Image (spheres, rainbow, N blue to C red):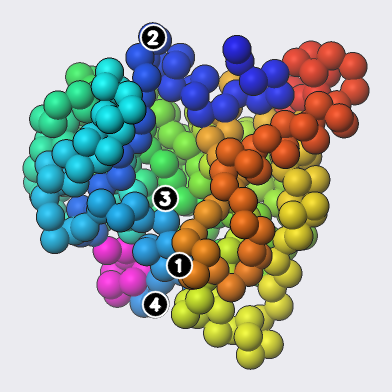
Amino acid sequence: MANPWYKDYSEYLAERWPGVKVQKLSVDAGFSCPNRDGTIGRGGCIYCDNRSFTPGYCDARRSVAEQLADGRRFFARKYPQMKYLAYFQSFTGTHASAVGRLAELYAEALAQPDVLGLIIGTRPDSLPENVMDLLTEINRERRVIVEIGAETSHDATLRLINRCHTWRDVEDAVRRLDSRGIECGLHLIAGLPGESCADVLTTVERSCRLPIASVKLHQLQVIRGTRLDRLWRTGELAVHPFTLEEYLELCVQVVRRVDRRVAIERFLASAPPEMVAAPRWGLKNYQFTNLLLNRLAATAPGDAAAESRPDKN
């Protein structure tokens, strides 16, 4: 039964692959990021440690085929009929030395058993025309979904966290993808330094005015050893880690601003506990989602499906 409060990711996948159980399989293809390697900047985003969200079977020293085979074995034990989407998750999934190298990596992923399509995580400033041409060509035969790290719509925050792009870059990238018939989702972070809940909701509203198919929101985690961690501990940067109650209430407000045409993929980041300085809630994704669904049921006026979400589009 469909989630009555918002389109979740399982509904999103079911719309695109009816009757098929589909799972993302993450891949580390050895990419860097343009704000790490000097292309546009150095040091990367102040909060980022890729190890905090990369599955254990991902290892750039191993081939794409080997990583996907490990992922398939893990899920096939419980779901032998499962199909997969190869998810180029680590760092910037379109940032390679040449577009030919990207073509090789994507083709290797699509050649693996039971892989239906690609999900490519990237930045809004890492989609030059030759890469767009490649994605368009692949998308004619196999579905390509691009997930763009936007994080926030506020340029002052983007500068503070060393993203090295602007919100206008995000808008441009989304519209260029849409013009080529390629689905796009945005990654957003709640609780970035200097931002209020109202700022987060503004970003959500601006995102939903764009031709996107999904949003992925999560709370800011202070990961031990990152530049954000050091700046927070020394008092050089003010960071307010959400309490669980604060974040639940924010997510209720987010849901009420997202029209059902846009799927909400997730609300929670869950790095390995030993890596997290704050906030430390000790919850898994499904546990947080259950808390949120209960909160939505308790606070929505009238009929849930009809009244809990005003159409902002």
Residue at left offset 73%, top offset 28%: 312
Q: Is residue 33 magenta?
A: yes
Of tags 2 and 1, which is closer to the observer? 2
Q: Is residue 149 magenta?
A: no
Mark 4: few/some/many CA within 10 Å (<14, 14-19, 20+): some
Of tags 4 and 3, which is closer to the observer? 4
Which residue is identified by label 4?
43
| Disc with the residue nearer the chain's start (4 vs 3) | 4
Mark 3: few/some/many CA within 10 Å (<14, 14-19, 20+): many
Of tags 3 and 2, which is closer to the observer? 2
| Disc with the residue nearer the chain's start (1 vs 4) | 4
Q: Amino acid at mark 2?
A: Gly
- Tag 4 near tag 3, CB within 8 Å: no
Q: Range of the magenta residues?
A: 32-40
Of tags 1 and 4, which is closer to the observer? 1
Q: Is residue 133 left or right of residue 193?
A: left
Q: CA distance from mark 3 to mark 2?
A: 33 Å
Q: Is residue 299 visible?
A: yes
On the image, which quarter does residue 193 sit in? bottom right
Q: Is residue 36 left or right of residue 64?
A: right
Q: Amino acid at mark 4?
A: Gly
- In this picture, is 230 found above or below 63? below
Which residue is identified by label 3?
124
Q: Is residue 299 left or right of residue 98?
A: right
- In this picture, is 302 found above or below 233? above
Quarter of the picture containing the C terminus is: top right
Which residue is identified by label 2?
19
Q: Amino acid at mark 3?
A: Pro
Q: Where residue 201 appears, x then y in whole percent?
A: 73, 46
| Disc with the residue nearer the chain's start (2 vs 1) | 2
Residue at left offset 47%, top offset 80%: 225
Mark 2: few/some/many CA within 10 Å (<14, 14-19, 20+): few
